[in-house]
Amino acid sequence: MRIRSKALRRLRQDRGMTQNQLAAALGCSRSAVSVWETTGRLPRPHRLRLLANTLGVPIADLIETTESISLVSLRLTAGMLAKDVAHALKVSQSTYCHVERGRQRVPSRWFPILSQAFEVPEELLAPLRERTPTTDANGGAKPIFAPPHTSPSSLLSAAPLNGVDYSPGPTVQNHSAGARITPQGDHAPYS
């Protein structure tokens, strides 16, 4: 996510403001305003809200979303690891990863915490509220990557890799079924 830098410059100029005047109204430096207008870097959430209010536009008019908003893109933009977000949410990393991968809905109690952790206004997280978990026809989670026509048994029966045969060997007898393995490797009944 980025700020619409050209739109920001146009809005500022349409209101007859210089970068210095806008910076003073926002309580930041002129160079910060310049960075937003040239690089499209997002200001912090509280400053983004103040910027939108100062310019008299909704926040959505200032934000450019070239990609769909996802927890992954937000987390990476914030420079966080999944374990860091899980810690902020006070959940296990696996729980957070299930939600991030779309296997579960984003719990509503997470939105204020995610807004603060990712340093984005909560309004920008609205598309995440509407997403449903990604499941297959049987109700299970869809795999992230599944090579076409590949099953575990077909992988094992494939040609040897680097001269090593990985196919399953002979079946091992269950020791509780009354058999023992002799030093020669044969199975003999217990006496």
Image (spheres, rainbow, N blue to C red):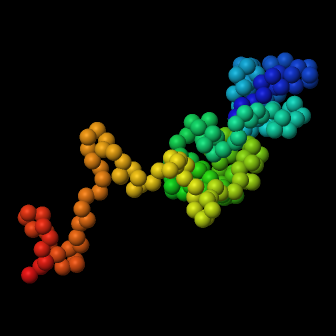
Task: Name the residue nearer the viewer: 32 or 104.
Answer: 104
At horizontal 92% and vertical 22% (from top left) the residue drawn is: 14
Task: Name the residue nearer the viewer: 183 or 57.
Answer: 183
At horizontal 62% and vertical 53% (from top left) the residue drawn is: 102
At horizontal 50% and vertical 50% (from top left) the residue drawn is: 149
Horizontal side of 43 relative to 87 (left or right) equals: right
Q: Quadrant of the N terminus?
A: top right
Residue 95 image point, x, y percent: 54, 57
Residue 175 image point, x, y percent: 20, 74
The answer to which quarter of the image holds residue 5 is top right
Horizontal side of 92 relative to 153 (left or right) equals: right
Task: Name the residue nearer the viewer: 101 or 109.
Answer: 101
The answer to which quarter of the image holds residue 164 is top left
Can I make out residue 116 in this image? no
Q: Quadrant of the C terminus?
A: bottom left
Residue 166 image point, x, y percent: 29, 50
At horizontal 75% and vertical 54% (from top left) the residue drawn is: 130
Residue occupying the far right of the picture: 15
> How many marks are shown on the rendered structure?
0
Whether 73 is drawn above or below 153: the answer is above
Whether 67 is drawn above or below 40: the answer is below
Horizontal side of 159 relative to 120 (left or right) equals: left
The answer to which quarter of the image holds residue 190 is bottom left
